[in-house]
Image (tube, grey):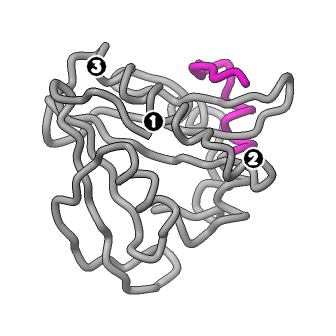
Amino acid sequence: MNLKLATEADWEWVKAIRLEALQSEPSVFGSSYARESLYDEAQWRAWSAGQGKAIFLLYDGKSLIGLTGVLAHRDDPTTAMCIASYLKPAYRGQKLSRLFYQTRLDWARGQGFTRLVVGHRASNLPSMHANQAFGFQETHREPHTWHDGTEEQEIYYELLLPGYIGGG
């Protein structure tokens, strides 16, 4: 397995796996296939890389099997947010999310962030279990209307990076 930091030049790979994720798991993301399938090349290049963000592509040999990301929080310069994690179904249950978490933690620390946050739809139990297994603590819940019109709470978690000693 190889996790690669995406660049703007990887935009077509990022687009392919992100659209696959949105199409195959529409209920777990904060965006939709209908919205992102309309993005042009410039938007995909900006989504793939840029200041204050990192998108990582996971490969099994030469096969692209997953995506994850982390970016600076728009309202708090000390905080980074985990975003957009997806693994192809055949690769789930193999503890590859640990690789995603560790990579995002390492990136956030390297950028000087002291806090990492993540949120998910209340019904997304795999995300809940992964967040908790990696040491994230629930901070709060908020009502949320999702892109598909469903009203369901969003659960938020945080991990304070200076105190992080390992997990998974």
Residue holding disc 1: 101
x and y percent of residue 2 in the render? Answer: 70, 21
State which tag comes first along the sequence, 3 or 1: 1
Q: Quadrant of residue 6?
A: top right
Q: Residues within 10 Å of mark 2 (few under 14, many from 20)?
A: few
As measured in the structure, the alpha-carbon distance from the residue carrying label 3 to the one carrying label 1 is 12 Å
Q: Which residues are magenta?
A: 1-17
Q: Is residue 18 above or below residue 55?
A: below
Residue nearer the viewer, 60 or 67: 60
Amino acid found under the numbered disc labelled 1: Tyr
Q: Is residue 11 above or below residue 137?
A: above
Amino acid found under the numbered disc labelled 3: Arg
Residue holding disc 2: 91
x and y percent of residue 137 in the render? Answer: 22, 53
On-image quarter of the C terminus: top left
As measured in the structure, the alpha-carbon distance from the residue carrying label 2 to the one carrying label 1 is 16 Å
